[in-house]
Image (tube, rainbow, N blue to C red):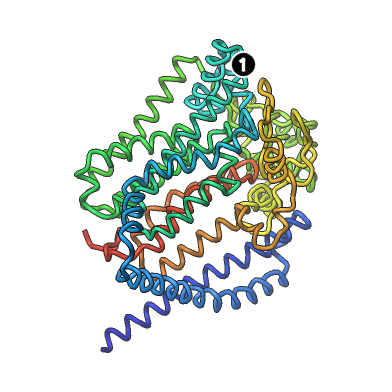
Amino acid sequence: MNGMNIRNRGKENADRLVAGVFSFLFAAALLFGRRLDSVENVDIRDWRLWVSILVLTAVFSVLTPFLWRLLDWVQIKGMSVRGRASEKSVSNKITNVLEWADRHAVLLSFFFLLLCWLPVFLAVYPGFFVYDAQDEYVQVASRTFSTHHPLVHVLLLGGMICGVHKLTDSYNLGIACYIILQMILVAGGFAFLFWYLREKKIPRAVRLVCLVYLGLFPTVVMFTLCSAKDGLFTSALLLLLVCLLEMGKGEMFFVSKGWRILFVLSGMAMMLLRNNGFYAFLVMVPVLLLLRKRQWRQVLFLAVCAVAGCLLVNGGLKTALHAQSGEYQEILTVPIQQMARTYKYAPEVFSEKDREILHEVLSEEALLLYTPRLSDPVKYRFDNEAFAKDKAKYAGLWLRAGMKKPLVYLNAWWMTSYGFWYPDMVINVYGGNTVFTFTYKDSSYFGYEVEEPGVRESRIPWLDEVYRKLSLEVWKEKVPVVSWLFSPGAMFWLYAFLFTWLLHQRRYEIMYPFLPLFLLWLTVLLGPTYLPRYVLFFWYGLPLFLGMAVMETEGEAFAVKKE
């Protein structure tokens, strides 16, 4: 009895610690984000800020366990209702229909999603050709390639447009063919996801809600019909997450050739379509080796196959296409922004000699283009050749300036990343920028554009106007509660809260497989700005995460058992 009491007290203390840490971080995110949003600066020396954070932490520390218990009650109540419902007799016709629908869940979900997306595709025909789309097409059209964008996606997108144009003399038809292909691939990935949820006996009602969500929620639809690589990348990531969930069950994954092949292929696709996918995968591998100690050789072999496949494909394409590389600004986007902010707000930091060194890689004109929320104006003018000649010299300059003005450096980084962790956020990083057919004003939530050589030819103008307003008008980001459904920061905290709930329940078998989502989230904090496209996995992955969270526990933890 004493041992049980000690264990219970230990669990309660652990829950208090988890609730306290979560509450502190959430409170800090709210108050830091509010200051960044209003005055573009956080003074961490302000004692009033920390008092406010502590007060909010105390409130959330009480509220968080209460919400855990509420979710526990809802889960138990749902299980009870399902149990009673299964005992009730229903007509043979209804039973047969439900069983038929379950047997054909893959095909039904696949075609349902395509039917949901088809009207929007017709409304925005030939699709959203935006976010580096023109650059990727030009690489193929001009036969001049670089590694700035993933070569696999460049060839797929640009090759299809050029090929269809050569056959039909229509750029729009080429863009439309690519969008249709992407719709089919994404719908196929989602259909596989619903098959997996059915296999895990997730309630039909939950699966139906998730299916409608993926078919109709604007953020999902926008990026499914967008030429950017984010939709395909996120679909590959979802397949990898399913593989990790299956791996967490134990031996069956390692004796199934299909699961192992899917793990390698989805991991390869994820890494080939985004550079940060490669880094997240590499960090994930040691964690998997630690969690699957008994099968560490097999895990390592599969990971090596995925990484080697990615490197071979990328290396082969780079050689075959004579693709140019040597661009450093993408990985240096945060240091570049930090230097530019320091030059603007604390120019006295730089001596005459330091100014000369700085201007070798960033001209005076480039530094004057500094904007707090977007590094592109300065980053694109970074001199890669000068930097490559003496990297240590410029690293020393960055370090000297940062030691003198660390708060300036912190605020420079926070201003390009706080949209990923501040829930009450209006996405308007491109405000004032003019593109092909419009100028960003109140919101730059989604690009909406059809870049040249494409042109918008809407078949359903009123629905096209709906998506234009969703993309470029701020109203959705001002409506209470609704705005959080569209917010990258709010989606992050939703996942973080559900993770604390699973931790409270000691359901590690659900938590660990979703580690890649948080690893990817960490990588985007070092990016050029905050946009929903960079964390699309929060929207695409929500049905899988919620479905597994409400699943009745099987009593088999991913890493709890001693192997």
Outermost residue on the bottom side: it is 1
Residue 5 placement, left or right of 519: left
Res. 119 in view: yes
- Above or below 2: residue 173: above
The image shows residue 332 at horizontal and vertical percentages of 60, 37
Residue 449 placement, left or right of 232: right
- Above or below 413: residue 449: above
Residue, disc 1: 170
Q: Which part of the image, by quadrant, shows the N terminus?
A: bottom left
Res. 521 in view: no
Amino acid under disc 1: Ser
The residue nearer to you, when weighing 264 against 385, is 264
The image shows residue 136 at horizontal and vertical percentages of 58, 23
Badge 1 element: loop
Count up the numbered dots. Answer: 1
- Above or below 516: residue 554: below
The residue nearer to you, when weighing 124 against 340, is 124
Q: How crowded is mark 1: few (under 14 residues within 10 Å), some or many (20 or more)?
A: some
Residue 140 placement, left or right of 248: right
The image shows residue 502 at horizontal and vertical percentages of 41, 66
Q: Which part of the image, by quadrant, shows the C terminus?
A: bottom left
Residue occupying image coordinates x 56% and y 27%: 148
The image shows residue 331 at horizontal and vertical percentages of 57, 37
